[in-house]
Image: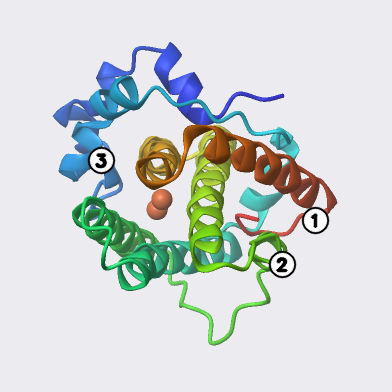
């Protein structure tokens, strides 16, 4: 079992990552993902929620070395993932207009993911990389969505728990990318993203716990987490987040 990036974050007393001085070291013109007020509340959120999500499959560091070798293609996929993450948060708003307690945070998450997209796109622009006309199939998400149950409430719960797992996987892999990169500014950019995505892993589980019994949520989370580990282990490596 590998600890989710969130757990690593909790253990290392990460106050330095939230200092303003960190932003000044980002690539010129790139907006830091840690600027958002949600990120500044990260430690508060984590200590309040006290959730733990251990990813079953630990991505080998070699995955990141391969991804970094074809970094422009990785960036194209990364931008696409951020765009889809923003759309996913807004799709929850559309799917559950009655769950008013979580709508403001879902909107904030959608905005934050869109800011990530903007930051990645700026990085692409700085490297002369365009958005692709067409992306290959996202087999990782396709396999995860197949696991969702079919009643409206069960499907919603599964989608939220899958969102948590996907965010945690993103956090794990951004950390590996940061470690594999040589350029210091881009390394910091990915470390900041790691922090941001790690927080999202907790947000969606927290939402699920508001509406469904804790036992049901954790049993389902455990099942989906195991399944996600198998999916990751079986997928071919490519210069993409999944
Ligand atoms: Fe993101
Ligand atoms: Fe995210």
Locate residue 112, reporting x and y percent.
Answer: 27, 55
Q: Which quarter of the figure has residue 113? A: bottom left
Element at label 3: helix
Q: CA distance from mark 3 to mark 2?
A: 30 Å
* Residue 117 sits above or below residue 184 on the image: below
Q: Residue at x 58, y 60 (%)?
A: 74
Numbered-mark total:
3
Residue 29 shown left or right of residue 198 in the figure: left
- Residue at mark 1: 235
Q: Residue at x 70, y 60 (%)?
A: 147
The extreme bottom residue here reads 133
Q: CA distance from mark 2 to mark 1?
A: 8 Å
* Residue 147 sits above or below residue 28 on the image: below
Q: Earlier in the sequence, mark 2 or mark 1?
A: 2
Q: Residue at x 73, y 40 (%)?
A: 226
Locate residue 240, reporting x and y percent.
Answer: 63, 59
Q: Earlier in the sequence, mark 3 or mark 1?
A: 3
Residue 232 seen in this snapshot: yes
Q: Which quarter of the figure has residue 36? A: top left
**Closer-to-camera residue (53/132):** 53
Q: Earlier in the sequence, mark 3 or mark 2?
A: 3
Q: Nearer the viewer, mark 3 or mark 1?
A: 1
Q: CA distance from mark 3 to mark 1?
A: 31 Å
**Which quadrant: the N terminus?**
top right
Element at label 2: helix
Q: Are marks 2 and 1 in contact (CB under 8 Å)?
A: yes
Residue 175 shown left or right of residue 47 in the figure: right
Q: Residue at x 31, y 58 (%)?
A: 119
- Residue at mark 2: 139
Q: Are marks 3 and 2 in contact (CB under 8 Å)?
A: no
Locate residue 217, reporting x and y percent.
Answer: 53, 40
Locate residue 14, reporting x and y percent.
Answer: 33, 18
């Amino acid at each position: 079992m590998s600890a989710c990036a969130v757990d690593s974050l909790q253990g290392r007393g990460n106050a330095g990552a939230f200092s303003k001085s960190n932003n000044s070291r980002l690539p010129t013109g790139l907006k830091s993902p840690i600027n958002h007020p949600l990120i500044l509340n990260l430690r508060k959120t984590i200590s309040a929620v006290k959730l733990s999500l251990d990813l079953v499959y630990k991505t080998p560091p070699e995955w990141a070395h391969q991804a970094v070798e074809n970094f422009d293609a990785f960036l194209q996929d990364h931008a696409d993932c951020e765009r889809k993450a923003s759309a996913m948060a807004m799709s929850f708003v559309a799917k559950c207009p009655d769950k008013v307690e979580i709508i403001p945070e879902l909107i904030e998450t959608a905005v934050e993911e869109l800011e990530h997209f903007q930051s990645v796109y700026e990085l692409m622009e700085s490297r002369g990389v365009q958005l692709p006309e067409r992306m290959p199939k996202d087999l990782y998400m396709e396999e995860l969505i197949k696991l969702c149950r079919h009643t409206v409430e069960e499907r919603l719960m599964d989608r939220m728990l899958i969102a948590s797992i996907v965010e945690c996987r993103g956090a794990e892999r951004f950390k590996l990318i940061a470690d594999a990169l040589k350029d210091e500014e881009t390394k910091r950019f990915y470390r900041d993203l790691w922090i941001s995505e790690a927080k999202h892993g907790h947000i969606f589980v927290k939402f699920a716990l508001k509406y469904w019994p804790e036992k049901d949520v954790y049993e389902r989370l455990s099942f989906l987490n195991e399944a996600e580990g198998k999916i990751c282990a079986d997928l071919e490596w490519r210069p993409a987040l999944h």
